[in-house]
Image: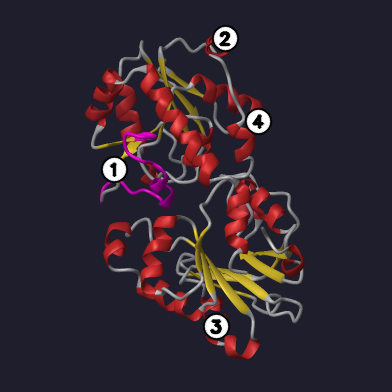
Amino acid sequence: MLNFSFMALKKVALLNPLVPHYRDAFFKQLATHIDLDIYVYENEDSDSNFKISTLRVNKIKSFGFLGNRFIAYDPFPLLAKKYDIVVLMLHFGHITSWILLLTRIFHRKKIILWGQGISVKRYLKERKHPNFFFRLMISLSNGVWLYTEEEQKQWKEIFPHKPIVALNNTISGVEEVLATDYTTDERKVLKEKHGIHQDICLIYCARFDNPYRRFDLLVQTIERLDPAKYGFIMIGEGVHKPDFTRYGNVYDYGKVYDKKLKDELFAIADLYYQPGWIGLSVVEAMAYGKPIFTFKRSNEVLQCVEYSYIHDKQNGILLDNVEELKHRLTVLLQEDMREMGEISKRIVSDKLLMSYMVKNALSIL
């Protein structure tokens, strides 16, 4: 049980580049327990690949250099006397954050760092040798919010007495997605409505903004599977989006923010398929009760930290290559996929509800 009378005393400033729509519920629920001010340092038009939240935020000045690998921002709004705690990003390219961490003895703000405790691009290396700059930042902080239990375990071994918590990163509206349910007959009606005729449908739902998502493998899969039997539902836009118009078994919906339409498309789909860089999209797919198919993390296929939510042969399949995907689809029965989908939903309801993410965050404030 949260101690609401104590938490209400805490005045917190939180820094993010922008607030995307999928963070709405996290910040709204957090603000019911603490006095929260959100600060952002990027302009709303700086990233058109996701929907910007309508939450009230405070803009602070910033500038980047060396291709925005390093960023300096105005620290003075965060140092206002009214704030007890400042939540900064776990990002060693934030020059101002280093200054705030090093001068904590003077400004006396409690500093929580929030972010991924490991680089996606250097994941395999940093599993063995954690990042030196992350180690230094964490040592200077009062505590850390990490995304997943896997990251928490690694850093707790290095800082056993430091307040470090896994938020179990999730999305706004996850409870509503979990409650979405369609019967077999309703799914048949939806397939007819959308003109989808294949027996097995794979769905992809993520931005096409990052080539590390391995769109080449996505195209290979489309070209190697029987177009009469396998259909592909595509949700998302981006500069690296392949031309799907030449494939008659690809149903491209572009950006979809309408929940009813997304509910229908996920109801039609038998499984979620994203070859690489799988992140928060996996939570939504699991909440819809879909088994997750993706490729094993390697130097060639990079995966985000939420990849740890996938348990091989339980709620999904971790693949070596496209040929293995073809084989798995051949031998898996619809009942097998339904069972994996049920396990996906169970993992979300047991660990990835927004109320759990908020509770985890509050636990070290």
Q: Which residue is mark 3?
A: 99
Label 4 sits on a secondary structure element that is loop
Decide: is 272 above or below 72: above
Label 2 sits on a secondary structure element that is helix
Please check the rendered image and state whether residue 219 is part of the magenta-colored stretch, yes or no. Answer: no
* Cβ atoms at labels 4 and 2 below 8 Å apart: no
Q: Residue at x 51, y 68 (%)?
A: 144
Please check the rendered image and state whether residue 305 is part of the magenta-colored stretch, yes or no. Answer: yes
Q: Residue at x 29, y 29 (%)?
A: 220
Decide: is 326 above or below 108: above
Q: Amino acid at mark 4?
A: Asp
Q: CA distance from mark 2 to mark 3?
A: 59 Å
Q: Earlier in the sequence, mark 3 or mark 4?
A: 3
Residue 296 is marked as 1
Q: CA distance from mark 2 to mark 1?
A: 35 Å
Q: Quadrant of residue 231?
A: top left
Residue 193 % position (x, y) = 58, 11
Q: Amino acid at mark 2?
A: Val
Q: Which residues lie in the magenta part?
A: 299-316
* Cβ atoms at labels 3 and 4 below 8 Å apart: no
Residue 189 is marked as 2
